[in-house]
Each structure stands twice: as structure tokens, then as C-alpha cells.
Image: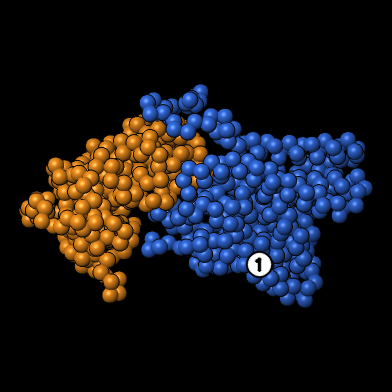
Chain colours: A orange, B blue
């Protein structure tokens, strides 16, 4: 497995407040890394930095070993990082196809089509249908508007869209909150399939059962610092809660493992 | 409980986990909503036409068709531009005033610069028409810049430019019309092809058809709808929302300029007050035609039907000797009913969505731009 995204010693100060202090983590291609922590632990700040929405105060970000800097979210997307925020950013009255292709519409290839921006609806429909089938999503009709989808289907659409246009890293912010049990399962299965496509996924969540179900490793933040990175065999609800609340501290073997990986 | 539609690739219908919230009846009904809406309002138009035909033998005549279509022409062009604007969730109150100003600007140029120079009419007329369209474009661009680049709501921006355009139009000739323009203008505006198709109507029809295609079939139209639906989603998708909004208002202004030319050509004069009643008629036509004032949904076909409902009421009531003021009453009633029925359609979807998951920022009131409700937090 190759290290897809690595973050070294990342810091962010807002005035005198340290939102993030020297956090390091890494995700392999085809791996789901959980990112957990209590409110104010620095998850959102880290996510914003990785999405290019805010610049870090210190530290570096490497994609495939190459250092990168994001001036804005578009730069992060260019570098292969897609983010699905909690609000999903779907256009409710447009159909699934229009949402899936938003900003990347396929145009008719003839001269006139390119001149006037004639949408190649047939190709977009076919591609969307193919992608939805490949990811085995539960969206019954890609011509229905996003408004008519269930909460889980909307989340699935947003993730499928982001996954389809990202080549490297997918950031998911609380993808299973506010969903019913069955819908959570759909989302988690989709995350598995995206991972199997070789995309590195960072899964930010408060839902411990979902984190345990979908993540290979979990990085725990606490008060802006790295509390621990837990490997698969250490992933228990008890461990997670312990590190999140600070009942356990960094002496766990997991941290050693994480250090070992980073020192390569 | 899957809905498999004939002749359409089944999109991943083969999932075993199934649809978690099957509501096939309402969903199928809502799927056909756009066309159903157009049919419904088209039916209203047909009923009105049949009613007038029965009431008066003069309704279905060539003279009345020419009258009705001429009445509809200017409102139609304004309504087409307004449809794009309203689809983005905005509004343009200035179109009627811009129409008047454009006609005055064109007539003023023809009357002042070319009356003294002895040249062929054609050059003078061409420059006059061009100036009129450009004058409309300038106001469209001004609206576009202010709406796209500042947090001022479109309602306020275009209320301001309405005043500016009205005042400037009156200033050009002290509130009087300018009729000292080449006679060929009036000839042009009153030429009939085959007795049934006035040239202005033909021009308006071609532009309208083209705009209908642009809104329904092109990327530009898609962005227009998406911006009105969720500006945040458009920004996140990397689309330049500001540039697009600018273009939409620019088009609206240019179309008002073209309408100004056509009105000037029909009257054979530039009249500063010529568009003052078209403003609200154009907006009413768009809304009657099913375009949502909340943005994100609308068709040019609907606006055409809405325009003709208004135009037919104007000429039909005159022909049947009803005081024409009833036309305003009738348009008002139809406007309110059309929006009411539209809201009833929407209500089902809204409640369902709310019960599942709170859609953040989905209920932005009309005329309030996203810039006011929280603009691009760090997203460029």
C-alpha cells in the first residue's frame, strides 16, 4: 500500500488560539482512516485545511510524497482531494444527473454543440446510471430531483459524485449523522466500495459504531493535538472513547506504530 | 416498490436493500410536474381564447391577431429575459424602464446626429437600433455587476436602475416622445409578412425560441437553474457563479433593448413611457407560466403562455366591450391562483424533506440573494 496523503506537524492558530497543534497523520490508497475527537478537538479545522478552505499556520501536506499547498478549495480539488460537507451542496430541484455532473457537464461534440454548450444529456444519463449501478447505490430513478431523494440517498449521491471526480483523497464530514439505521448501512457500504476503488478516505464522525464498522485505522484528536492513532486490532469502542475523553493518553502502542510508519 | 420506467435504463434498480422510502404515487406525479404545469396553464389560455371566440365574432380575426401579437411582442421579450433572472432566484424590476430608455436613446441618436448629416436612412436606422440595444445592455450589465458583486438584493438593485432608466429616458427629450426619426423605422415596424406575421413578432418569436432552447438544453441554462436552486452547490462545483449571474442580467437588459427597438419601430417614435406598464406584466407572465420566484425552476414555454394569457385578456376584453380595466383585475386573479396552485404542488415535497433531514439553507426567501444569507465561507 502506498501512502496517498500524509500530513506532518500541521498547526493552525486563530489569533492566540491554537486550534491545531502539530498533528500528523497519513492515509494509504484504498484505506479508510477515521478521524474522531470531541467538539473543539480540531477535526473541522483539519478538514478545512485539507479541503483548501483555510491555510495552515505550519506543517506540511504531502500527496503521493509530493508537498502541496492549497490557495483555495479549487486547488485542493485539482490536487485530487474532494470533500463532502454535511450540507451536501445538492441542487434540490435538479435531477440526479444534473447534480452528478454539476460543473463538469458533457457537451455535444459537434461544432455547434460546443459553441452553444449543448448538453449531451444521453451521455450524462448513461454515465450516471452506470456509475450508480457500479457503486450499487439505492437511488431508484436518476431522473428524479434531489428533493425527492431520502436523506440516505442524498448522502449517497453526494459521496458518489465526489468519488467519481476525485482520483486520490475523499474527505467525508459526518456522512452518517441524522440518518436512519438502514440508510447508514447504505452509506457505509458505499464508503467501502469507494475505498475498494483505491481512493484514500478520511471519515470524520461522532458515530462510534460507524467508525468501527468502516475504518481500518482511526486518528483521535484531543484539544487540537494528536491523542492517538489506533490500528485495526486496537479499535474498540472503549479505546476510542478513552482517547477522545482523555481518560487514556498517548502511551498506547498505536502511537508507536504510527511513528514508525511516519519515519519511513 | 421500485418504479421502472419503460424505455429508460434502469438506474441501479437492482439493489437489494431497496428504496427506503417508497412513495411511488406522489413521486410519479411529481416527476411529470413540469410538463403538467405547462399543460395546465396552457389549458387556461385555451379556455380564455374559446370564451372570447364565443363572446365575440371579431376575436378570431386577422385584425385581432395582429393586435394581440403586437401587444404580446414587447412583453414577451421582457418576460424571456425575466425568466432567466427569476430562475436564478433574482428579479429584474427595471426591464420596462430600460425598454423605454433604450427606445429613447435610439430615437435620440437618430434624431440628433443623423438628421443633420445627409446620408442614407439605412445607416442612421442601423446605428439607432444598435444604440438602443447597447443602451439596454448597459443597464443589464449594471444590474449584473451590482447583483453579482455586491450584497445588495436584486430587488433593490433593479428598483434603483428602474428609477435611473426612467429618469434618463425622460431627460433625453424633457419627458416628450421623439418622433423626428426616419420614416423607414415605422415602415420596418409595421411590415407584415403575408398579412399575418408582423416583422417585430417574427423577431421576438425567433429570439424566444432560441432562449427556450438555451434555458432547457444547454449548460448555460443548467447553471441558471442550479444557481437559483442552490448557489452554494454551484460555487462548490467550481462554477463561476458571479460571472454567470452577470451574464443573465446582461441578457435580460439586451432583450429589453431589443424590445425597445421593436416598440419604437411600431410607434415610429421613441416614447419614454412606452415600457412603464410592461414591467409587472412581464413578471406576472413569467410567474403565471410556472417559473418559481424562489429560483431553480422555470421554462420559456411557460412564460410564452403567460404572456399570451395577458395579451389575450387585453385585446379580448376590448373586443367584447368590457372596460379594459378588468384586464388588470383578471391578470391579478390569475397570477395569485397560479402561484397558489404552484405552492400546493410544492407543499408535499417540502414537508417530506423536512421530516427526513433539515436541508440547510434550502428555504431562502425570494429576492434575498445568497450573499445576504451567508456567502462563500472561504470558498472562492
* Residue at the spot 29% in from the left edge and 42% down from the top edge: A210
Can residue A70 be seen in this snapshot?
Answer: yes
The residue that mark 1 highlights is B159
Label 1, secondary structure: give it.
helix
Which residue occupies 37% across, 37% down? A181
Q: Establish if B351 lies above or below B113.
A: above
Q: Residue at x 28, y 71 (%)?
A: A17
Please give left or right for residue B355 compared with residue B255 in the image: left
Q: Decide which of A124, A80 is in the foreground and name it.
A: A80
Q: Is residue A132 visible?
A: no
Residue A245 picture quarter = bottom left
Q: Position of residue B316 (x, y in %)?
A: 85, 45
Note whether A194 is above or below A39 in the view shown. above
* Quarter the C terminus of chain B occupies: bottom left
Write down the quadrant of residue B113 in the picture: bottom right
At label 1, counting other C-alpha atoms closer than 10 Å, the crowd grade (few under 14, some 14-19, many 20 or more) is some
Please state if B89 lies on the left or on the right of B21 as rendered.
right
Amino acid at each position: 500500500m502506498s501512502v496517498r496523503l500524509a500530513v506532518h506537524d500541521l498547526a493552525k492558530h486563530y489569533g492566540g488560539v491554537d486550534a491545531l497543534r502539530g498533528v500528523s497523520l497519513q492515509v494509504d490508497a484504498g484505506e479508510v482512516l477515521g478521524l474522531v475527537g470531541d467538539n473543539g478537538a480540531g477535526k473541522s479545522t483539519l478538514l478545512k485545511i485539507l479541503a483548501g478552505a483555510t491555510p495552515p499556520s505550519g506543517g506540511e501536506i504531502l500527496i503521493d510524497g509530493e508537498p502541496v499547498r492549497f490557495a483555495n478549495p479549487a486547488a485542493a480539488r485539482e490536487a485530487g482531494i474532494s470533500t463532502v460537507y454535511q450540507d451536501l451542496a445538492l441542487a434540490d430541484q435538479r435531477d440526479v444527473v444534473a447534480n452528478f455532473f454539476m460543473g463538469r457537464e458533457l457537451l455535444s461534440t459537434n461544432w455547434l454543440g460546443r459553441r452553444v454548450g449543448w448538453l449531451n444529456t444521453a451521455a450524462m444519463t448513461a454515465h450516471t446510471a452506470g456509475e450508480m449501478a457500479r457503486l450499487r447505490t439505492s437511488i431508484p430513478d436518476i431522473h428524479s430531483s434531489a428533493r425527492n431523494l431520502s436523506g440516505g440517498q442524498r448522502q449517497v449521491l453526494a459521496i458518489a459524485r465526489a468519488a467519481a471526480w476525485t482520483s486520490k483523497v475523499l474527505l467525508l464530514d459526518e456522512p452518517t449523522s441524522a440518518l436512519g439505521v438502514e440508510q447508514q448501512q447504505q452509506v457505509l457500504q458505499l464508503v467501502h466500495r469507494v475505498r475498494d476503488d483505491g481512493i484514500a478516505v478520511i471519515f470524520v464522525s461522532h458515530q462510534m459504531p460507524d467508525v468501527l464498522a468502516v475504518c481500518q485505522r482511526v486518528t483521535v484528536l484531543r484539544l487540537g493535538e494528536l491523542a492517538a492513532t489506533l490500528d485495526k486490532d486496537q479499535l474498540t469502542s472503549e479505546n476510542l472513547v478513552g482517547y477522545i475523553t482523555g481518560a487514556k493518553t498517548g502511551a498506547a502502542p498505536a502511537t508507536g506504530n504510527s511513528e514508525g510508519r511516519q519515519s519511513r | 416498490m421500485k418504479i421502472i420506467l419503460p424505455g429508460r435504463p434502469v438506474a441501479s434498480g437492482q439493489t437489494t436493500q431497496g428504496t427506503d422510502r417508497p412513495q411511488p404515487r406522489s413521486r410519479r406525479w411529481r416527476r411529470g410536474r413540469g410538463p403538467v404545469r405547462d399543460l395546465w396553464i396552457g389549458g387556461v389560455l385555451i379556455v380564455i381564447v374559446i370564451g372570447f371566440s364565443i363572446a365575440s365574432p371579431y376575436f378570431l380575426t386577422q385584425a385581432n391577431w395582429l393586435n394581440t401579437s403586437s401587444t404580446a411582442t414587447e412583453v414577451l421579450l421582457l418576460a424571456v429575459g425575466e425568466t432567466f433572472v427569476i430562475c436564478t432566484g433574482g428579479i429584474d424590476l427595471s426591464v420596462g424602464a430600460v425598454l423605454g430608455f433604450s427606445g429613447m436613446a435610439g430615437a435620440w441618436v437618430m434624431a440628433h446626429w443623423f438628421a443633420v448629416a445627409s446620408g442614407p436612412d439605412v445607416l442612421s436606422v442601423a446605428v439607432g437600433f444598435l444604440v438602443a440595444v447597447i443602451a439596454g445592455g448597459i443597464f443589464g450589465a449594471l444590474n449584473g455587476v451590482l447583483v453579482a458583486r455586491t450584497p445588495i438584493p436584486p430587488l433593490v438593485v433593479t428598483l434603483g436602475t428602474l428609477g435611473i432608466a426612467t429618469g434618463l429616458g425622460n431627460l433625453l427629450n424633457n419627458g416628450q416622445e421623439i418622433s423626428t426619426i426616419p420614416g423607414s423605422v415605422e415602415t420596418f415596424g409595421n411590415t407584415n409578412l403575408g398579412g399575418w406575421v408582423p416583422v417585430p413578432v417574427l423577431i421576438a418569436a425567433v429570439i424566444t425560441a432560441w432562449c427556450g432552447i438555451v434555458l432547457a438544453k444547454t449548460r448555460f441554462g443548467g447553471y441558471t437553474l442550479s444557481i437559483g436552486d442552490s448557489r452554494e452547490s454551484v460555487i462548490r462545483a467550481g462554477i463561476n457563479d458571479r460571472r454567470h449571474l452577470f451574464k443573465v442580467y446582461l441578457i435580460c437588459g439586451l432583450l429589453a433593448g431589443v424590445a425597445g427597438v421593436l416598440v419604437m419601430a411600431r410607434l415610429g417614435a421613441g416614447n419614454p413611457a412606452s415600457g412603464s406598464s410592461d414591467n409587472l406584466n412581464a413578471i406576472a407572465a413569467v410567474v403565471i407560466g410556472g417559473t418559481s420566484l424562489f429560483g431553480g425552476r422555470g421554462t420559456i414555454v411557460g412564460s410564452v403562455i403567460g404572456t399570451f394569457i395577458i395579451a389575450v385578456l387585453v385585446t379580448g376584453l376590448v373586443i367584447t366591450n368590457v372596460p379594459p380595466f378588468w384586464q388588470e383585475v383578471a391578470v391579478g386573479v390569475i397570477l395569485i391562483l397560479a402561484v397558489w396552485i404552484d405552492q400546493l404542488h410544492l407543499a408535499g415535497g417540502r414537508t417530506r424533506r423536512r421530516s427526513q433531514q433539515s436541508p440547510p439553507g434550502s428555504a431562502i426567501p425570494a429576492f434575498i440573494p445568497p450573499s445576504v444569507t451567508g456567502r462563500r465561507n472561504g470558498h472562492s
